[in-house]
Amino acid sequence: MDRHDILADNPVEKRRGYMPGISVNPGRLLFTAGMTGRQPDGTIVPGGMAAQTQRTMERLQAILHHAGADFSQAIKQLLYITDMEAHASSGRAVRAAFFGEARPTSTALGVQLKNKKSIKKEGIKKKYKGYKQKII
């Protein structure tokens, strides 16, 4: 099995001992770690759900870009959300803007996260030769 680590520019995760993305049999599958609204210095973006969702999606977008994928190829997403009402009122619209017309299947779980994180997202992306699709 071929394995290819996917790193965005200045990944916080590199210092924490894990990869934000791993492609298995390059060009076929991309797995992403859970992403949160962290800034490059490792602190959580201030401003609540909308700001943290924006930053989370930007971080995931960077991983996708480095792997040759984008949000239009999404088919699954899993979200861990601390405040479902805040997500419904502001986070959902921010997230939807990244997906455009694509509507992946989605599971959202209400959880308690440390360090004032409002949202965490992870996924798997699937890509085929000449045709890319992601499971997130």
Image (tube, rainbow, N blue to C red):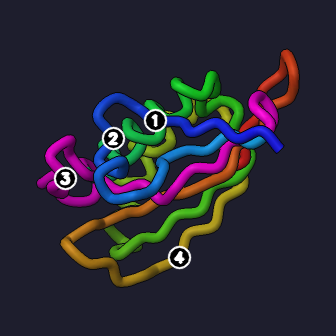
Q: In the rendered view, would you say 66 is above or below 15?
A: above
Q: In the rendered view, would you say 112 is above or below 13?
A: below
Q: Residues within 10 Å of mark 1 (few under 14, many from 20)?
A: many
Indicate whether residue 49 is drawn in magenta. Answer: yes
Q: Secondary structure at mark 2?
A: loop
Question: Label 3 belongs to which residue?
Answer: 42
Question: Label 4 belongs to which residue?
Answer: 109
Q: Residues within 10 Å of mark 2 (few under 14, many from 20)?
A: some
- Tell whether 8 sits left or right of 10: right
Q: Secondary structure at mark 4?
A: strand
The magenta stretch spans which residues?
25-51
Residue 121 screen position, x and y as percent:
49, 58
Is residue 47 something one can see in this rendering? no
**Residue found farthest to the front:** 1
Mark 3 or 1, which is nearer the eye?
1
Picture disc at residue 16: none
Which residue is rendered at x = 60% and y = 33% of the image?
71
Q: In the rendered view, would you say 51 is above or below 26?
A: below
Residue 3 screen position, x and y as percent:
70, 41
**Residue found farthest to the right:** 129
Indicate whether residue 35 is drawn in magenta. Answer: yes
Question: Label 1 belongs to which residue?
Answer: 7
Earlier in the chain: of badge 4 and badge 2, it is 2
Mark 4 or 3, which is nearer the eye?
3
Q: Distance from label 4 to label 2 (Cα)?
A: 25 Å
Q: Distance from label 3 to label 1 (Cα)?
A: 16 Å
Picture disc at residue 11: 2
Mark 1 vs 4: CB contact within 8 A: no
